[in-house]
Image (cartoon, helix red, strand yellow):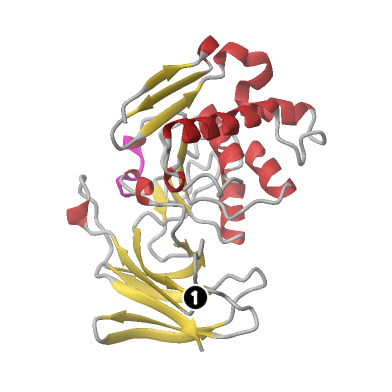
Amino acid sequence: MTAGLAAKEGLMHFYGGDDFTLLYLDCRNNRKNDWWWGYHNIKRSGETYKDCLTPTEKRVLSTIEWVVQKYDINRNRIYLSGVSMGGSGSLGTGLCRGDIFASMNVMVPAGVEHMFHRMKNTPHPEPAPVVNFSSHIDGWAKGQEDFLAYMDENKYLTIYAWGPFGHTADARKSESVVIEFPWLDIVKNEAYPVFAGATTDQKYPGFMKKEAADQKGQINGYFRWRNIKDAPKRFEMELRLVTQKELKKPVDTPESSLTCVTLRRLQHFKVDQTKQYKWCMVRGENILQTGQVCPDDLGLITIEKIKIEDRPAVLMIEPD
């Protein structure tokens, strides 16, 4: 499919190709009402829009739905991305709509207030994985520590990179392993793993902390996965670390990482909170790790201290 469209008053730009569709929503012609993708409305009338979408949010989501229906877009491959104001708008509009977006990619998002207002005040489906490029010396990065803590506490997946590059969209100055992360390969109708506390992660220095360690770093950027089996009583997923030969830029890729893994967006595998599950990591005929785990109160399975290497291994889970 190849198509192009510009809506009246320059509010929408749509471009399509044989294997992609790009939709740009432009708010510059209506700055008084929907500049900042509805957050100004929320800031002025927080209680009014506590559990109700702003007109801007409605327009964004309804425009996406119109494009999906008109051009027969695959609903499992809808992605959201934005820079600066578009980044904060993507977080606020998209993180709470994992039923629409397969994954998200944001660059130097200008604030997290919109995102927190939506995530903390309204019910929402499982969020899409987020790739986030930020800079701790960017004045708009205030609150990124809270974002990272929130994602970790709630077991949501973020692939994160930072560096001392300020408020710029030049991602080349951040970690290339995250730049090359294949976020457009994630689809909405497949399970994905959430990684936490990996030994291969650097530590985010904090807002304007120019003397702290790890002035440049990444979180979860080395991990890769592939779904193998998602059946009612058995789940299998290949886990590994990316290798140097897969990357365009030279990176000292690690050979192994110890991390926690939580499974989200399970499609068919049934998790019973009253049952215990056995798991193992296997490579060929070799059993690398094994154990038992009970689901948490949200019905999520989290496995502690899995060793993931640059050689693929398969995580298998079934009722004990």
Element under label 1? loop
Q: Residue at (26%, 86%) from the top-left corner?
A: 286
The verdict on residue 175 being magenta is yes
Q: Is the magenta stretch mostly helix, strand or loop?
A: helix
Residue linked to disc 1? 232
Using residue 284 as the reference point, say whether residue 129 is left or right of it: right
Q: Is residue 242 above or below residue 180?
A: below
**Residue nearest the observer in this picture, 75 or 315:** 75
Q: Residue at (61%, 25%) from the top-left corner?
A: 36
Give how far across and how far down residue 95 sits, in percent.
Answer: 57, 45
Give how far across and how far down residue 148 sits, in percent.
Answer: 56, 51
Say whether residue 313 is visible: yes
Q: Residue at (45%, 31%) from the top-left corner?
A: 166
> Residue extending furthest right?
47
The N terminus lies in which quarter of the figure? top left
> Residue extending furthest left?
245
Q: How many marks?
A: 1
Using residue 14 as the reference point, say whether residue 86 is left or right of it: right
Q: How crowded is mark 1: few (under 14 residues within 10 Å), some or many (20 or more)?
A: few
Say whether residue 108 is visible: no
What segment is highlighted magenta in the picture?
172-178
Amino acid type of disc 1?
Pro
Q: In this view, does 34 lie above or below 142?
A: above
